[in-house]
Amino acid sequence: SAQSHALTIHRPLRVHQVEERFYSVDGTPADAVHLALNVVMRDERPDLVVSGINQGGNLGDDVTYSGTVAAAREAAMLGVPSFAVSVVARTDFHFDGAAAFALRLARHLRDHPLQSRSLLNVNVPNVRAHELPEYRFTQLGQRIFSDEVVEKADPRGASYYWIGGQELGFTRAASSDLQAISEGFISVSPIRIDQTDYDLLTRLAADGPDIP
């Protein structure tokens, strides 16, 4: 959890074949995709990479920290269409609903491929396959967290910390992924690899070349 797009570069990685066509990697989610596409499947790359199903939602600002989304992003960066899928729950996960929607989406993307260097982030309510709601195409929302950091002391008196404040809610926006999930819909958010703020770039260029 919260691995983001970390790649392991200071120690060797190992790939283990669990059974035919099933492999594990002792690294991060992005490591796994990188090795899958550049080593295991180098000579026969897949048509699509699906990352997940994650236990818990990846909504709004979560995508910055999410290893699940990063795995899909790594695939898109390497030229393979991809999406990440998560089931929004904390316990008692029902994966069959998210799996059923992921299959529908994969079949759709077969005939309607994504543009290069883009991916989809999918969040599905915690329901059974026969209970799947409608979906909405959404933008990333913004969660509101407390800035709490818990400080403790170990037996030797040295301080250590737990990061992770409580969720207080989210910024209301009709088209956001958080709003869609709160209303019981599936959220499908398009994400681009290019993180350039083009509006700000235009304003900076209009102000002239000199920074006082």
Image: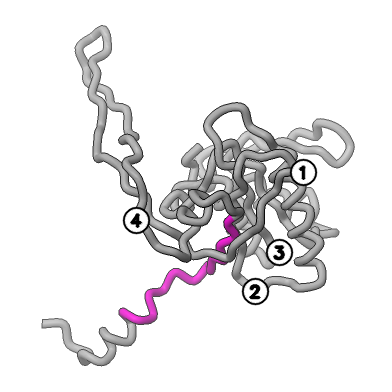
Q: Is residue 5 visible?
A: no
Give the foreground label among 4 and 1: 1
| Sequence-earlier tag: 2 or 4 | 2
> Answer yes or no: do the residues labelled 2 and 4 have beta carbons within 8 Å?
no
Task: Assess disc 3: are there few (<14), some (14-19) or many (≥20) residues with their C-alpha within 10 Å of its C-alpha.
Answer: many
Distance CA(mark 2)–CA(mark 3): 8 Å
Query: In the displayed structure, does residue 127 sit left or right of residue 1?
Result: right
Residue at image location 59% in from the left, 53% down from the top = 185
Disc 2 element: loop
On screen, residue 87 versus residue 166, left or right, reads right
Q: Quadrant of residue 86?
A: top right
According to the picture, the residue beneath numbered tag 3 turns out to be 80
Q: CA distance from mark 3 to mark 1?
A: 30 Å
Q: Earlier in the sequence, mark 3 or mark 1?
A: 3
Spot occupied by residue 6 in the image (x, y as percentages of width and height): 50, 47
Residue assigned mark 4: 171
Which of discs 3 and 4 lies nearer the camera? The answer is 4
Tell me the tag on residue 130. 1
**How far is disc 1 from disc 2 in space, using C-alphas?**
33 Å
> What residue is shown with label 2?
116
- Amino acid of disc 3: Val
Q: Earlier in the sequence, mark 3 or mark 4?
A: 3
On residue 62, the disc is: none
